[in-house]
Image (tube, rainbow, N blue to C red):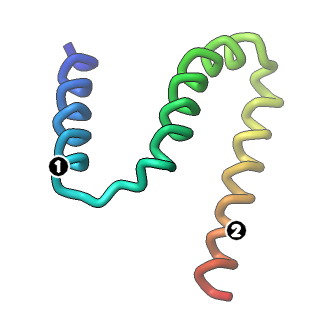
Amino acid sequence: MRNVVLGVANTVAAIGFVLFASIVWSAALPLAIGLFLGSLLGPRIVRRAPQTALRRGIALAGLGLAVYLAVEAYG
């Protein structure tokens, strides 16, 4: 039930964006492809990857993103 409600909410939000926001459609297609590939490949990789290495990789990616965003924001 939760997934159905979230799916409906996301569908309504997507329709709202399409109708009321300016969308860069040339960026939407690569994002959609990445979304679908990630949803197919992500669970398979997570199940097989060693958890410690996966957690460290996620932590490093998050730290790298934080540093990047800080440099962009503060110079």
Q: Counting other residues with Cα less than 10 Å from the Cα at mark 2, is it few (<14), some (14-19), or many (20 or more)?
A: few
Q: Which mark is on residue 11?
A: none
Taking 2 as reference, is 40 left or right? right
Extreme bottom residue here?
75
- Residue 36, how many percent across, how many down? 52, 23
Tell me the element at label 2: helix
Question: Considering depth in this image, is 1 or 32 the residue closer to the camera?
Answer: 32
- Look at the numbered disc 1 and give the secondary structure of its residue: helix
User: Which residue lies at the image location 22% right of the left edge and 31% below the top edge?
Assistant: 11
- Residue drawn at (71%, 41%), measured in percent from left and top? 58
Looking at the picture, how far across and down is residue 14, in whole percent?
Answer: 25, 40
- Residue at image position (49%, 49%) is 26
**Extreme residue in the front direction:** 26
Quarter the C terminus occupies: bottom right
Image quadrant containing the N terminus: top left
Observer-nearest of 26 and 38: 26
- Using residue 33 as the reference point, say whether residue 11 is left or right of it: left
Q: In which quarter of the image is residue 2?
A: top left
**Residue at the image position 50 percent from the left and 49 percent from the top:** 27
Q: Residues within 10 Å of mark 1 (few under 14, many from 20)?
A: few
Q: Is residue 57 above or below residue 42?
A: below
| Numbered circle sitting on residue 68 | 2
Q: Which amino acid does label 1 sit on?
A: Leu
Of tags 2 and 1, the one toward the viewer is 1
Do callouts 2 and 1 mark residues in contact (Cβ within 8 Å)?
no
Marks 2/1: CA–CA distance? 33 Å
Please state the total of marks drawn on the protein image.
2
Q: In x, y percent, where is residue 6?
A: 24, 27
Q: Which amino acid, mark 2?
A: Tyr
Q: Which residue bears the numbered disc 1? A: 19
Q: Which of marks 2 and 1 is nearer the N terminus?
A: 1
